Image (tube, grey):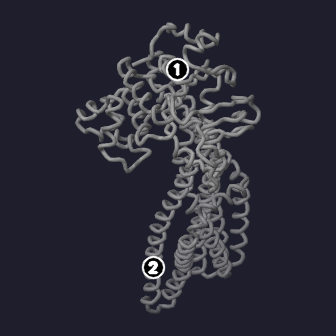
């Protein structure tokens, strides 16, 4: 687990290896200055004992302090900037993966958890990037200190090494617990983010249902769980630090006693004893750095493991389109040939044996009970889902001969639940065509009867859609206007009139008829009033196409369609809307 996580962490670190190497060299130079200080101190004491001039040793000591401080400052500033660049790379990689991922695989995870992957988890890579250099520097400083201590007195070095071995063994036993606690803490934070994001998205329903206390209690319980894991990690870390510091302090006390006895017996110079004690105190620095950096590395490896889960999300294949074109242009723009599909290997087929031809011009409506396969057809058209068997053709060519981008360039889609994206009205209208002019934008706004409304807003097209001045129905009309900009070959509408009033609905039907006169319009509707004037209605049940025809034909021939009409209390004599 540790080795796999470390290998994946190196994916983020290796592109910055030159900067990390410079940081390592600077750290080694700073360590060299620190290691030389006790020896120069011994020189000062020996010079003082001999009654010689103190200028040279004191000057050397001062130079070491100044040079060491300058190098350390340079290293800290450089490593700080390096760590932020590494975090940026990690976040860019995660975000890019999100937007290239298969839609259905992405939607299996809570949105808040995905956000945590890109923010909190990548942030932990920050400390891990510096900890690798810190571990190397601290290890070299640790070994260097022991070597110089051996130069001064081998007996005292033996006692020091024994103390270090005991402390190191205890720390080694505790370190895996830190990694486990950190991983659990990050998992619980992801769960908390997902629960909170979902509750805030449904805040109106939460309040209307008087469920504020229940929801907040449930999410606070997740927060307590995250805190409990974090407290466990903090306690383990504190234990490791306490053992390290206490062990070294006890070793220093023992060394002081033994060293004093040896100096009294004439086996050790007083200046050497003082220098040795300085190294003993200085040894606490590398041990503290090793502990701290290893803890940070454990957190980074745990975070890297969670980021690695994002890397495992399948991405949409980047097919290269073939240049062979069919002879002539068929009457049908989109054709399903015996298509069956399921969402996962262990789930039943969502649609089966779909044979359907969508005319190049006209309005095709898809209706049916919930779970009948309507949305699955849209997922197949948009290439969010791949057929288990059968084939889909666009302009007579198999879908697999197009790239995802080429297919979607022929489509415009208005989804039911989230019809707009964050930003302004202008941002939303130009989402598919960033180069669209204001004249084009107001033309489609006029088509959905929003041009006067937008023109009257204080900020016009630059009004934020987070503003309370834009209602839910108006947001949905903006989404429809965006889809109608630069008329696509196929317009896909998933209950496009779900949140609009009757008069606006009539205007939208005018837009649909206008588009259907020049291109293909496919509508999924739970309200039959939106499709009564369709050129053809497809009735689905249990993943199959049950019947197809006009409204009048289906009322006469299909019992399910009649029941749907009766359930919505729509009379058989209703004329087309508009």
Q: Determine crowd level at label 1: few under 14, some 14-19, many 20+ residues with C-alpha closer than 10 A.
A: few
Side of 83 where 143 appears, left or right: right
The residue shown at (66%, 39%) is 392
User: Which residue, as the protein is rendered here, is positioned at the far bottom?
Assistant: 52
Q: Determine crowd level at label 2: few under 14, some 14-19, many 20+ residues with C-alpha closer than 10 A.
A: some
The residue shown at (36%, 28%) is 474
The circle on residue 214 is: 1
Tell me where residue 510 appears, x and y as whole percent.
39, 26
Tell me where residue 464 appears, x and y as whole percent.
33, 38
Q: Are marks 1 and 2 in contact (CB under 8 Å)?
A: no
Looking at this view, is 12 or 572 the one in front? 572
Q: Earlier in the sequence, mark 1 or mark 2?
A: 2
Q: Locate residue 287: give its quadrant.
A: bottom right
Residue position for label 2: 67
Side of 5 where 110 appears, left or right: left
Q: Tell me the element at label 2.
A: helix
User: Which residue, as the protein is rendered here, is positioned at the far right?
Assistant: 346
């Amino acid at each position: 687990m540790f080795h796999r996580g470390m290998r994946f962490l190196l994916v983020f670190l290796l592109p910055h290896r030159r900067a990390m190497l410079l940081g390592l060299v600077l750290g080694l130079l700073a360590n060299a200055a620190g290691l030389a200080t006790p020896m120069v101190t011994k020189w000062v004491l020996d010079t003082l004992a001999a009654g010689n001039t103190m200028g040279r040793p004191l000057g050397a000591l001062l130079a070491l302090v100044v040079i060491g401080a300058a190098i350390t400052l340079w290293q800290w500033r450089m490593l700080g900037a390096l760590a932020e660049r590494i975090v940026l790379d990690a976040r860019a990689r995660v975000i890019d993966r999100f937007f290239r991922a298969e839609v259905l695989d992405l939607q299996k995870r809570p949105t808040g958890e995905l956000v945590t992957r890109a923010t909190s988890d990548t942030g932990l890579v920050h400390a891990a990037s510096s900890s690798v250099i810190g571990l190397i520097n601290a290890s070299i400083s640790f070994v260097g200190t022991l070597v110089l201590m051996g130069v001064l007195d081998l007996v005292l070095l033996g006692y020091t090494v024994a103390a270090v071995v005991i402390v190191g063994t205890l720390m080694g036993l505790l370190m895996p617990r830190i990694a486990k606690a950190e991983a659990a803490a990050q998992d619980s934070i992801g769960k908390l983010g997902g629960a909170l994001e979902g509750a805030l998205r449904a805040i109106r329903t939460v309040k209307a249902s008087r469920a504020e206390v229940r929801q907040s209690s449930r999410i606070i319980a997740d927060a307590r769980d995250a805190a409990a894991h974090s407290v466990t990690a903090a306690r383990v870390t504190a234990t490791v630090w306490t053992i390290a510091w206490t062990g070294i302090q006890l070793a220093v006390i023992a060394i002081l006693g033994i060293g004093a006895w040896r100096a009294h017996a004439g086996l050790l110079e007083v200046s050497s004893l003082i220098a040795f004690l300085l190294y003993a105190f200085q040894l606490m620095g590398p041990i503290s750095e090793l502990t701290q950096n290893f803890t940070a590395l454990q957190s980074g490896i745990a975070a890297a493991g969670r980021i690695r889960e994002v890397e495992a999300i399948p991405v949409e294949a980047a097919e290269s389109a073939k240049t062979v074109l069919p002879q002539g242009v068929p009457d049908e723009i989109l054709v399903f040939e015996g298509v069956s599909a399921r969402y996962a290997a262990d789930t039943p087929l969502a649609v089966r044996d779909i044979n359907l031809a969508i005319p190049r011009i006209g309005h095709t409506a898809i209706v049916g009970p919930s779970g009948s396969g309507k949305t699955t057809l849209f997922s197949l058209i948009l290439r969010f889902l791949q057929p288990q068997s059968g084939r889909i053709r666009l302009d007579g060519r198999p879908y697999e001969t197009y790239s995802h981008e080429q297919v979607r360039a022929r489509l415009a889609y208005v989804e039911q639940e989230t019809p707009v994206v964050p930003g302004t009205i202008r941002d939303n209208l130009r989402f598919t065509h960033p180069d669209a002019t204001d004249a084009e934008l107001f033309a489609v706004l006029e088509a959905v009867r929003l041009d006067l409304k937008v023109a009257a807003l204080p900020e016009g097209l630059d009004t934020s859609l987070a503003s309370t001045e834009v209602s839910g129905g108006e947001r949905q009309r903006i989404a429809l206007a965006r889809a109608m900009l630069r008329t696509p070959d196929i317009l896909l509408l998933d209950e496009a009139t779900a949140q609009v009033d009757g008069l606006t609905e009539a205007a939208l039907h005018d837009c649909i008829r206008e588009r259907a006169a020049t291109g293909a319009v496919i509508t999924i509707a739970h309200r039959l009033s939106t499709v009564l004037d369709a050129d053809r209605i497809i009735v689905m049940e249990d993943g199959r196409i049950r019947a197809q025809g006009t409204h009048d034909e289906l009322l006469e021939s299909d019992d399910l369609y009649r029941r749907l009409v009766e359930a919505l209390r729509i009379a058989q004599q209703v004329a087309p809307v508009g």
